[in-house]
Amino acid sequence: MREDLGTKFIGMLLALLESFNAIGRFWKEAVFLCGSIVYLNHPALAQEYPASTIRLVVPYSAGGPIDLVARGLAERMSEHLRQSVVVENKPGADEIIASSAVARAPKDGYTLMVVTEQALVLNKFLHKKLPYDPERDFIPVSRLTEGHTVLVVPADSKIKSVGEFVRAAKQDPGGISYAWSGVNRIPMGAFTQMTGISVNYVGYKGGMAAIVQDLLGGRVDATLAAQVAVAQHINSGRIRALAVSGKARSVTLPHVPTFAEAGYPDYSAAFYIGLVAPAGTPSVIVEKLATVCRSIIQEPAFVQKFLVPSGLEPIADGPTGFAAFLRIDRASAEKRVQAAGMKPE
């Protein structure tokens, strides 16, 4: 009996010692974790950052408007941060290639991505399966700029205003061919829903360049395009602009009325360019990057050189403002995709 009690006592003592060891390990791990969190959000980390080259990923080919903004940003960031910022182009697949690469990158502030609504909002409703999570894999740094699109028709079109466009579409439902590529079908979907008209959507795989060529040749009737894609043809008289989105007229197209002036004040066809980092990037680094971006985007010289030619406007939201904007944008995204008759593929 005594031997049994002794054995039990020894067993209980060993179990108690083991539990103490486990608790010790737990507290060691907890202290280490807390220390890591404190360090990663300590002001000293922001002072030390960046200590090496920053990679700025662009989901489009070199030479396009988004790439030009990114390169201008990288140049000025290098000067502000006193460290090299190198642009890396990863085009293709609706920004998915670049997004998935950045989502898997180290969360240390040395990999950033210039991004649009395509990757952060729309892809979720346009693709059945994504190799990244738009909401969980990135942390917003700054909504850098906002751009507006312009509704255009061939120069010899009988349609000379937005009102005539709507009347023509109502008189002949589906008779107007609307050229689209990527996501520029979505803003027309919103306009058809608002006005009760229908158009014949003609999809292009060659991007906006192919659409513009067919518009110049009169092979399609209309499209909504970023100003940079059509401004020179509008100013030369080879394409007619009916209206531009935005609250005010464009600096590059001052003779083109806004949709509000044309009688549709609630219509918006804006797009934006933002900057994100992999989720988990220390907040002090994110804030430092946002502050630098705000300073750059508000520089008159930067605006004139990199934004105005592409019909872009400076925004420079910080992480909180950009996150709030994304919540609103995501809330309406699915309905906008459905209004355009688009389905996940």
Image (tube, rainbow, N blue to C red):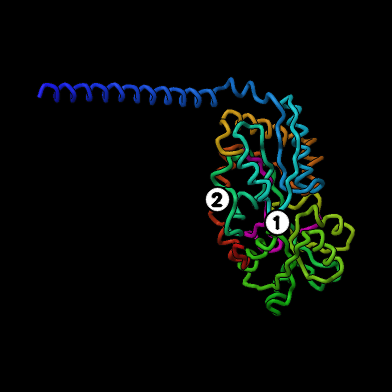
- Residue type highlighted by circle 2: Ile
Q: Is residue 12 above or below residue 294?
A: above
- Residue type highlighted by circle 1: Ser
* Label 1 environment density (alpha carbons within 10 Å; few <14, some 14–19, many ≥20): many
Q: Which residue is mark 2?
A: 328
Residue displayed at 75% across by 44% down: 89
Residue 290: x and y, percent? 64, 33
| Pointers 1 and 2 in contact (C-beta within 8 Å) | no
Mark 1 / mark 2, whichever is N-terminal: 1
Residue displayed at 86% across by 59% down: 233
What is the CA distance from the residue labelled 1 to the residue labelled 2? 19 Å
Residue displayed at 58% across by 65% down: 338
Q: Which residue is mark 1?
A: 245
Residue 225: x and y, percent? 75, 58
Q: Is residue 248 visible?
A: yes
Q: Is residue 61 above or below residue 259?
A: above
* Element marked by disc 1: loop
Residue displayed at 80% across by 35% down: 301
Q: Nearer the viewer, residue 172 or 219?
A: 219
Magenta segment: does it hold 272?
yes
Q: Residue furthest bottom?
A: 171
Residue 263: x and y, percent? 67, 64
Left or right, residue 316 beside residue 75: left
Residue 282: image quadrant is: top right
Q: Main secondary structure of the magenta part?
A: loop
Give the magenta part as a residue range: 255-277
